[in-house]
Amino acid sequence: MNMNNTFTLFLISIVFIVLFEENMYAQTTGLRIDYFTDHHLNPIFYNPAFAGEENHPMIGLSGRRMKNGVSDPSSFQGFIQGQIEAINSGVGFMVNYHSFGDIYKRRQMKVGLLYSYTIHAGEQGRFKLGLNTSLLHYNSDFVPNSNSGSVDVVKTNENFFKFNLDGSVLYLNGNFYMGVTVFHTNEPSFEFYNIGSVSRFQKEAYLSMGTQITVNEFITLHPAVMANFSLNQFSASFNNQGYFDFSVLAKFHDRYLVGTSYKLNQTPYKFALTAGIKLAEKYQLAATYHLKQSANYLNRNRIGVTLNYFLTKMESIEEGEGSEM
């Protein structure tokens, strides 16, 4: 990593912190949830342009569980992805499921196809355009009350799935990456009752970047930063609450990993610890423990678990075959 990339990462991180600290207590509208999973372990969940990247997992599964007040929300997600060289494109399939865990049994699920196209820029630079075309499901057992009391509340025949589109741009240069994704570009909405109670998935932006720093032949550091905020008519609306996450992973012999992350605006969590191991150069198991900062006894620490499968690099296979001869 050169000094220009290091300075860019540092400068943008500082800008994010200042912007989100200023709007820490603002409110949001529409439907938004906290991250499905930890972005530094599976960035493809937040940027579909990572589809086709050979140094990223081919298959990923993860889950997260917590307790927040009287609710017990949980998330589960998975993906499979790969590169098709003949069309210079990456493809994949992804599923996200989130249960809000409250008494109204709210839940959402997104099932989508991933696509990315690569445009080369210079000797090492690449721009990738990404799409996640998906079907989005949302449901809630909450029954609203009529304000006047004179109107009968009737459940409507709402579609089970709505079309959803996420678009992204990703820039890669060596070990450095920087990308932006807009979720719910078409803002799908769900209306379950006849009195105008509409649940709308508003447009969201995810900005992410990271790099790799080689300490020595055994140790590498992987700093990354991600910001998430809502959008208003294609412009950033900082009147809404934004999330910020800065993380650092350390890898030893590309087998063991430990790390930490700082979270802004994700009450009651601010810090998280990560540890994992890679087996047979293919399987990586990692767990993240989110430490609560609130004194509310109903809240508890949150845990997430990730399992990834990596393809063995062709160079390693060829070397192994040669050594047996």
Image: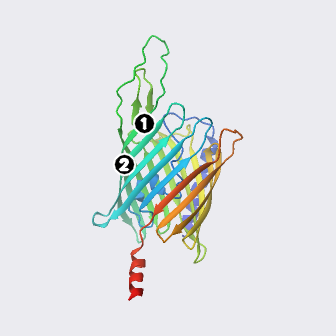
Circle on res. 228: none
Q: Which color scheme is applied?
A: rainbow
Residue 250 against residue 225 in the figure, above or below: below
The x, y position of residue 317, in whole percent, is 40, 78
75 left or right, relative to 274: left
Residue sticking out furthest to the left: 86
Residue 235 against residue 118 in the figure, above or below: above
Q: Earlier in the sequence, mark 2 or mark 1?
A: 2
Quarter containing the N terminus: bottom right
Alpha-carbon span between mark 2 and mark 1: 15 Å
The residue shown at (56%, 43%) is 242
The x, y position of residue 17, in whole percent, is 62, 50
235 left or right, relative to 298: left
Query: SS class of the residue under badge 2?
Result: strand
Quarter containing the C terminus: bottom left
Does the rendering let one see residue 202?
A: no
Mark 1 lies on residue: 138
The residue shown at (43%, 45%) is 183
* Mark 1: amino acid: Tyr
Residue sticking out furthest to the bottom: 325
Residue 53 against residue 66 in the figure, above or below: below
Toward the viewer: 80 or 215?
A: 80
Query: SS class of the residue under badge 1?
Result: strand
* Mark 2: amino acid: Gly
Toward the viewer: 153 or 209?
A: 153
Toward the viewer: 284 or 229?
A: 284
Does the rendering let one see residue 191?
A: yes
Mark 2 lies on residue: 112
Q: Residues within 10 Å of mark 1 (few under 14, many from 20)?
A: many
Residue 190 against residue 272 in the figure, above or below: above
The x, y position of residue 111, in whole percent, is 38, 46
